[in-house]
Amino acid sequence: MSTISGSGCDLLIPLSERKPLKDIERSIIKTYRKYLWSKFVKAVNDYSLIEEGDKIAVAISGGKDSLLMAKLFQELNKHGKINFDLEFIAMNPGFHESNRELLLDNCDHLDIPVKLFESDIFKIVDHIANDYPCYMCARMRRGALYSKAKELGCNKLALGHHFDDVIETNMMNILCSGNFKTMLPKLKSKNFDNIELIRPLYYVREEDIKRFTQNNGLSPMNCGCVVAAKKTSSKRREVKDLIKKLSESFENVEANIFQSANNVDIERILGWKKDDKKYSFLDFYDD
């Protein structure tokens, strides 16, 4: 028996209920075509995330999002018109052995040829940033993934952030940091030359990933973090709950939060920053 994380609860799924690989792969193209496959392909096309000759490092955390992303990449590689290569990489930042085994078992069942490499990030973060570990951990894990991608000769690193991650980030920046920034579908690394980060699940809703995972009997890891497990509160969880509550009173609130980053009116904002330089609307007021 193993657990799959849901919204506020854990669902127990026996491994015996895990569907065969061929059925899981077929469901991506058939059952969940509208919700997963089509949105994945749309993001790839809308934002030019994949180009001819790319070598993409697909980061596998062991969670539901990255496992689905890996399968979507495999399907696109089989059926798409663009020639590109894939490397599937996973980092062990200090998981409990059971989580490490679960990650490898899921990759084995899903026919994902993952390359697992070791690090001590959880131990380091617990020492230097015990009170607020998640931000530091995310930065360190991303740096390690960039390094591995570069070592393998990849020019792109794919992360499994989805639509809900994007809108939650928008809201967290407004409410907690007093700025308006979104999670971009792609960006060039400032610290690793010639490597681009891409987010091909940009349009995919988390609820649809959960349905795919549960209905196929998969049991991915949750966070797996031995540091954050000590914490009782999460601002991201609070923002997630806030957005859910707002959706009860405001129509299309999730889509509107997402579109707000697409519809910024530069003539109706007080100020902005570009290349580390700040600008005010007053700078252009008399033009």
Image (cartoon, rainbow, N blue to C red):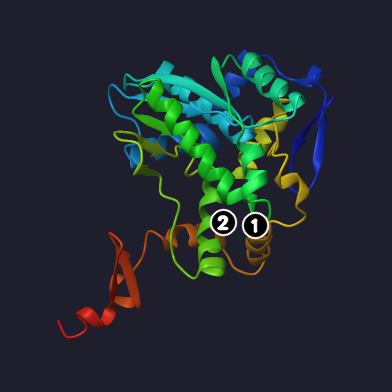
- Local SS, label 2: helix
Q: Are marks 1 and 2 in contact (CB under 8 Å)?
A: yes
Q: Camera-side residue: 33 or 181? A: 181
* Residue 2, position as x, y percentages in the image: 81, 27
Q: Give the amino acid at mark 1.
A: Lys
Q: Nearer the viewer, residue 54 or 133?
A: 133
Q: Is residue 174 rendered to the left or right of residue 242?
A: left
Residue with the mark numbered 2: 168
Instruction: Name the residue located 31 percent from the left edge and 37 percent from the top edge.
Output: 48
Query: Is 12 rendered above or below residue 247?
Result: above
Crowd around label 2: few <14 · some 14–19 · many ≥20 (10 Å) = many
The mark nearer the N terminus, 1 or 2, is 2
Residue 21 in the image, given as x and y percentages of width and height: 63, 15
Left or right, 31 with respect to 245, comes to left
Inter-mark Cα distance, 1 to 2: 6 Å
Q: Say which quarter of the image contains residue 238.
A: bottom right
> Residue at (56%, 62%) from the top-left corner?
172
Would you call the spot at circle 1 few (<14 residues within 10 Å), some (14-19), or many (20 or more)?
some
Q: Which residue is mark 1?
A: 240
Q: What is the count of numbered marks? A: 2
Where is residue 95? Give x, y as percent: 70, 30
Instruction: In the displayed orientation, state which residue is furthest to the bottom.
Output: 286
Kind of residue at badge 2: Glu
Q: Establish if 112 lies above or below 198.
A: above
Q: Of helix, strand and loop, which one carries label 1?
A: helix
Q: Is residue 80 left or right of residue 255?
A: left
Q: Please identify the quadrant where the N terminus is shown.
A: top right
**Position of the C terminus by quadrant:** bottom left
